[in-house]
Image: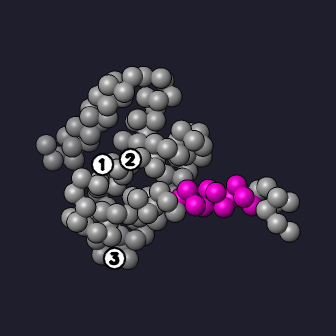
Amino acid sequence: MDERQRPGFAASRDRLMAVLITGAVLSLPVVLPGALGGIHSLIPLPVFYYLLRDGRRQGALIAAGGLLLTAALALALGTGPYLLVPLGLAPLGYVLAQAAYRNESPLRAGAAGVLFLLGLLLVLGLL
């Protein structure tokens, strides 16, 4: 039986690939700590993309799956402290997706993202 006869199979495989891609991007700071510099700014993008593409519920499940993969990888590699980078930046993808759902301007969405990150730094005591 091929994929055309089992449409649920193709959807499941697509979601699995989405989780793996999201996990791969979120895992960059965990796998290569300190080596990527500005590439960390790309961490929110898969979360943003899948929230817009698949909707809030499925996108959130994909992001959560990617974060779980990243956490497991951080534990396996012993790079737990670097897990704060994706844990801090992945929610920014959610903030930007919410702005896109509301059809806000890029300036307003960026301002919301900056305020989110500043608030996060204040909560963590890093600012």
Element marked by disc 1: helix
Question: Residues at badges 1 and 2 in contact (C-beta under 8 Å)?
Answer: yes
**Location of residue 95 (image quadrant):** top left
Quarter of the image with the C terminus is top left
Separation (CA) of disc 1 from disc 2:
7 Å
- Decide whether the magenta segment is chiefly helix, strand or loop: helix
Residue 76, relative to residue 101: is it above or below? below
- Displayed quadrant of residue 108: top left
Q: Residue at x 19, y 40 (%)?
A: 122
* In this picture, residue 112 sits left or right of residue 48: left
| Separation (CA) of disc 2 from disc 3 | 22 Å
Q: Which numbered dot is residue 44?
A: 2
User: What's the residue at 57%, 41% (across, down)?
Assistant: 53
| Image: magenta residue range | 9-19
Marks 2 & 3, CB-CB < 8 Å contact: no
User: Is the residue marked by circle 3 packed among few (<14), some (14-19), or many (20+) residues within 10 Å?
Assistant: few
Q: Nearer the viewer, residue 115 or 103?
A: 103
Q: Which residue is mark 3?
A: 77
Depth check: 38 or 122 in front? 38
Report, in whole angstroms, how far the alpha carbon at label 3 lies from the one at label 1. Answer: 22 Å
Q: Residue at x 38, y 77 (%)?
A: 76
Q: Tell me which label, 3 or 1, sits earlier in the chain.
A: 1
Residue at the spot of label 1: 41
